[in-house]
Image: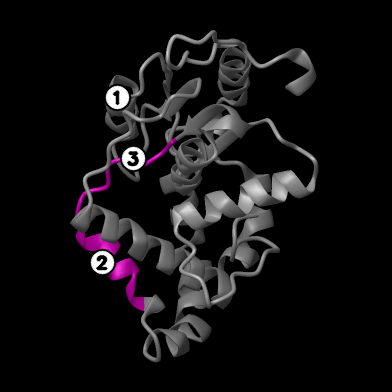
Amino acid sequence: DRPGFGGSSRPARKRWSACEQADLFHEAAAKLGIHKYLVLGHSWGAWIALEMARRHAPSVAGLVLVSGYYYPSPRLDLALATLPAVPLMGSPFRHTLLPLAVRLGWPSAMRKIFRPGPISNVFSVSTKEVASRPSQLRSVCVETALMLGAALFTKPCYRDIDVPTGIVAGAGDRLFDARREAERLHAEISGSLIEIIPNSGHMAHHSDPQAVLRMIDKVTCMPRPPKDGGSSDALSPAAR
């Protein structure tokens, strides 16, 4: 789990940007004795996957990016979603009204992230209580603030990504125009692969898991872009 989600804590002393989370996962892999790995990132996790490729390229055998929001733009809903993370004012709200609002709005939220694909009842039931915890709500709001900051103050560019990359998006994503985001990223990352899944929303890996698995296989077999005239090689079977 990423910091603050699922069963993982999110110490407040860190900002936990995508860069810091990328370093955390790289260090975790090293402690497990994994020195070459393929990274699959969904949604906000796609940012982290891209930062892992930037910061730890020798260890990253490839990327599979699913439903990423790579070029966020300033949006009112992003600004409003950051309010529960505001110190002092946000804490009482996260511990009282916001969890209730999340539970009441859960069916609508599931429709928004899954449709036009089918809603996974297993996912919906198993994540409802976790997603309405005050601690996880804070994590969501803080990361929304980071996304808003990126939209206001940075101009994302991914031309420096030089690892094998596969990009997957649902054609009917209702959170943002995931298809346009994926196509724009595909144009920026040299040699990348792309697949747009029809009749799928933000949860493309649930709607069509086989498409994501196919992309993993393709990226695993892609040669790494050569540097300075050197040779390139695909991820060996032993490292998959």
User: In the rendered image, which quarter contains the C terminus?
Assistant: top right
The image shows residue 28 at horizontal and vertical percentages of 70, 51
Question: Is residue 8 visible from the viewing direction of this image?
Answer: yes
- Which residue type does callout 3 highlight? Tyr
Q: Which residue is mark 3?
A: 70
Mark 1 or 2, closer to the camera: 1
Label 2, secondary structure: give it: helix
Q: Which residue is mark 1?
A: 188
Other residues around mark 3 within 10 Å, as few (<14) / some (14–19) / many (≥20):
many
Label 1, secondary structure: give it: helix
Whether residue 184 sits left or right of residue 232 in the image: it is left
Q: Which residue is mark 2?
A: 79
Question: Is residue 133 visible from the viewing direction of this image?
Answer: no
- Which residue type does callout 1 highlight? Glu
Most foreground residue, 200 or 162: 162
Start and end of the magenta stretch?
67-83
The image shows residue 133 at horizontal and vertical percentages of 59, 73
- Which residue type does callout 2 highlight? Ala
Instruction: Identify the residue shown where x is 39% and y is 77%.
Output: 84
The image shows residue 69 at horizontal and vertical percentages of 35, 42
